[in-house]
């Protein structure tokens, strides 16, 4: 009986490992990801039902997510968008991915395994990038567009950062080397950060800085140590920006875009016209705020702000304002209920001095920042990371 249980656990670990690697490194193979998620979910659910049943955390999270999906579905009644039903089906598949994590991570050992799978998936993605992306594309284009087996699900402009950038922040917070061996830790941070920067996403710089700053603040033993950490952090920040602005290949990939971004906080220069991302985002945010003010309670319908965008047919590039414009205060609160639960559990669960607790706090902080910079409510990777944090705190809340 024990042998069967061990073999079943090993099979579960292998299946979950394959699922995480495929999700991170081959997201553009959308049909395969969907099929694999259904297989993994069915396997995990059947094992739970044959054992001791489904935990409350799975039921509670499912209810919160289904509430949001149902609200989005109802918003089709007053929305100009006729594709909301398909969007809700897509969100249901994202929920299956989340439930795979909740069903698998029922203890800290499986959480650590999942984090290791994330690192493995990131390594596979790096190898794939090196093989697939032409040498002359590095530093000259958004290289994520070359990973596009299914064009509608390619890594696009920022997909690479949502893998390599997020996972690098987790490794940065792994101060006790629980997930990555000490001799490999710096190598992975540099590799993941460098390839993410080369994808042309400004977010990578800020994810890196936020991760390091959060680690320094949370791990400081006393005020003197904190001040010392902040001083070293400022020096490190200046070094990073110096390299980005002075190494040609990095400047071509991201430096000029940062230059355009920073120009809006000082004197406007010719850099403004080199990267339309910053200009368009400011217009999007202004329009989304206006739409929310005019429709504050239930919004204009999920995925419908783009019909009111005066600049181009696009999202608000900010999850907070996108949801406020799309589904109003009611939908906004409904979507962020899991986040509120995490914050509540953070206050209840006593902070541990181990790497895992720090990694979860850093990951959650980074995810909240990312929501400022893009629309994430239906982004598979970001939903996947969120439920990892949720799983960790539900585990420790029991004790």
Image (cartoon, rainbow, N blue to C red):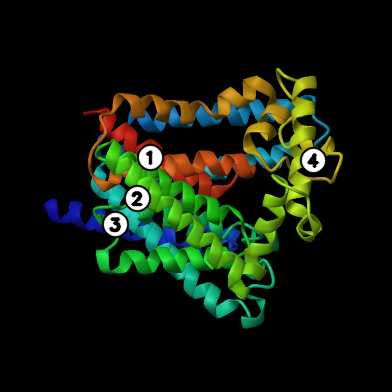
- First along the sequence among labels 4 and 1: 4
Q: Which label was assigned to residue 151?
A: none
CA distance separating discs 3 and 1: 16 Å
The residue tagged 4 is 283
Residue 326: x %, y % from top left:
72, 30
The residue tagged 3 is 179
Element type where label 2 sits in the image = loop
Proximity of marks 1 and 2: CB atoms separated by less than 8 Å: yes
CA distance separating discs 2 and 4: 35 Å
Q: Nearer the viewer, residue 275 or 351?
A: 275
Residue 392: x %, y % from top left:
33, 39
Residue 118: x %, y % from top left:
40, 57
- First along the sequence among labels 3 and 2: 2
Badge 3, how many Cα within 10 Å: few under 14, some, many 20+?
A: many
CA distance separating discs 3 and 4: 41 Å
Q: Answer whether residue 42 is visible to the viewer in this image.
A: no
Can you say which quadrant of the picture contains the C terminus? Answer: top left
Badge 4, how many Cα within 10 Å: few under 14, some, many 20+?
A: some
CA distance separating discs 4 and 1: 32 Å
- First along the sequence among labels 3 and 1: 3
CA distance separating discs 3 and 2: 10 Å
- First along the sequence among labels 2 and 4: 2
The residue tagged 1 is 361
Proximity of marks 3 and 2: CB atoms separated by less than 8 Å: no
Which numbered mark, 3 or 2, is in the foreground of this view?
2
CA distance separating discs 1 and 2: 9 Å
Element type where label 1 sits in the image = helix
User: How many marks do you count on the picture?
Assistant: 4
The residue tagged 2 is 173
Proximity of marks 3 and 4: CB atoms separated by less than 8 Å: no
Badge 1, how many Cα within 10 Å: few under 14, some, many 20+?
A: many
Badge 2, how many Cα within 10 Å: few under 14, some, many 20+?
A: many
């Amino acid at each position: 009986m024990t042998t069967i249980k061990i073999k079943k656990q090993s099979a579960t670990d292998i299946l979950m490992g394959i699922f995480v690697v495929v999700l991170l490194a081959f997201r553009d193979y959308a049909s395969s990801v969907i099929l694999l998620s259904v297989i993994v979910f069915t396997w995990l659910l059947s094992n739970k039902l044959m054992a001791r049943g489904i935990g409350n955390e799975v039921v509670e999270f499912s209810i919160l997510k289904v509430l949001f999906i149902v609200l989005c579905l109802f918003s089709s009644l007053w929305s100009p968008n006729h594709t909301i039903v398909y969007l809700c089906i897509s969100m249901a598949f994202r929920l299956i991915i989340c439930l795979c994590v909740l069903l698998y991570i029922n203890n800290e050992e499986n959480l650590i395994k999942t984090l290791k799978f994330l690192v493995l998936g990131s390594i596979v993605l790096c190898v794939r990038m090196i093989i697939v992306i032409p040498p002359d594309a590095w530093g000259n284009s958004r290289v994520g567009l070359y990973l596009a087996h299914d064009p509608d699900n390619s890594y696009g402009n920022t997909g690479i950062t949502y893998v390599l950038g997020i996972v690098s922040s987790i490794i940065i917070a792994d101060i006790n080397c629980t997930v990555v061996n000490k001799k490999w830790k710096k190598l992975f941070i540099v590799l993941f950060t460098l390839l993410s920067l080369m994808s042309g996403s400004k977010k990578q710089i800020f994810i890196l800085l936020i991760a390091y700053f959060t680690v320094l603040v949370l791990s400081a033993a006393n005020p003197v140590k904190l001040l010392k950490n902040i001083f070293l952090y400022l020096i490190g920040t200046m070094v990073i920006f110096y390299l980005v602005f002075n190494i040609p290949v990095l400047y071509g990939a991201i430096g000029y875009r940062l230059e355009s971004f920073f120009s809006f906080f000082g004197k406007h220069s010719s850099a403004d016209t080199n990267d339309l991302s910053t200009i368009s985002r400011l217009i999007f945010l202004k329009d989304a705020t206006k739409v929310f003010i005019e429709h504050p309670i239930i919004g204009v319908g999920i995925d419908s702000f783009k019909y009111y965008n005066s600049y181009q047919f696009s999202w608000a590039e900010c999850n907070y304002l996108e949801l406020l414009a799309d589904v109003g205060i009611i939908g906004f609160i409904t979507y962020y209920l899991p986040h509120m639960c995490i914050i509540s559990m953070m206050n209840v669960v006593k902070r541990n001095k181990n790497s895992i607790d720090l990694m979860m706090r850093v990951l959650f902080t980074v995810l909240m920042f990312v929501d400022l910079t893009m629309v994430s409510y239906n982004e598979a990777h970001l939903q996947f990371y969120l439920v990892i944090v949720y799983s960790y705190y539900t585990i420790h809340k029991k004790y």
